[in-house]
Image (cartoon, rainbow, N blue to C red):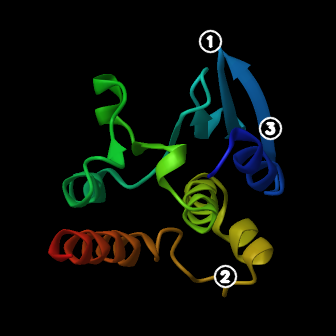
Amino acid sequence: MVTAQDVRAVALSLPRTEEHLIRDQVKFRVGKIVYVAISPDETVMGFGFPREERAAMIAAEPDRFFLHRPSDARFNWIDTYLTLISRAEMHEFVTDAWRMVVPKRLAAAHLDLPPTSPRREGAASLTRRVADHGDLHRRA
């Protein structure tokens, strides 16, 4: 099971990240841009995610992915329950959300990627993997 401490450890390992407590939520941000938030009861993690891919992610596994607040629909954002994701998934979600808000060169240098790599190159493949996993899960 993933905990808020696990999320904190990953987020704070990423350059330029700051932790803030805002309206009882722990938020991790770069500058003024929040890329991960943890609910006050530490059960829900919201994170930056491409808006154009969100519907597919939610449709693939609506029990795992959702929008906690309808007002978040206007942002590049999605939510999940910490108990329903693995540590590897959490690490990928947090890192990809961070990549959305930092300069490409910083992300490339920190993650040992070529500097010309797009920030969200893995999001579409992640969405497909989740959808495929959901299809396999439903067939079983």
Disc 1 from disc 2: Cα separation: 37 Å
Residue at the image point whose x is 56% and y is 54% from the top: 97
Marks 3 and 2, the one that precedes in the sequence: 3
Question: Which one is in front in this view, the residue at disc 3 or the one at disc 1?
Answer: 1
Closer to us: 124 or 119: 124
Closer to us: 136 or 13: 136
- Disc 1 secondary structure class: loop
Q: Quadrant of residue 131?
A: bottom left
Residue at the image point whose x is 66% and y is 82% from the top: 115
* Percent of width and height locating residue 16: 81, 49
Crowd tier of the residue under label 1, counting other residues whose Cα lies within 10 Å: few below 14, some 14–19, many 20 or above: few
Contact check, label 1 and label 2, Cβ < 8 Å:
no
Closer to us: 115 or 9: 9
Name the residue that disc number 1 marks: 23
Name the residue that disc number 2 marks: 115
Q: Is residue 115 left or right of residue 51?
A: right
Q: For the C terminus, give its image quadrant.
A: bottom left
Name the residue that disc number 3 marks: 18
Marks 3 and 1, the one that precedes in the sequence: 3
- Disc 2 secondary structure class: loop
Marks 1 and 2, the one that precedes in the sequence: 1
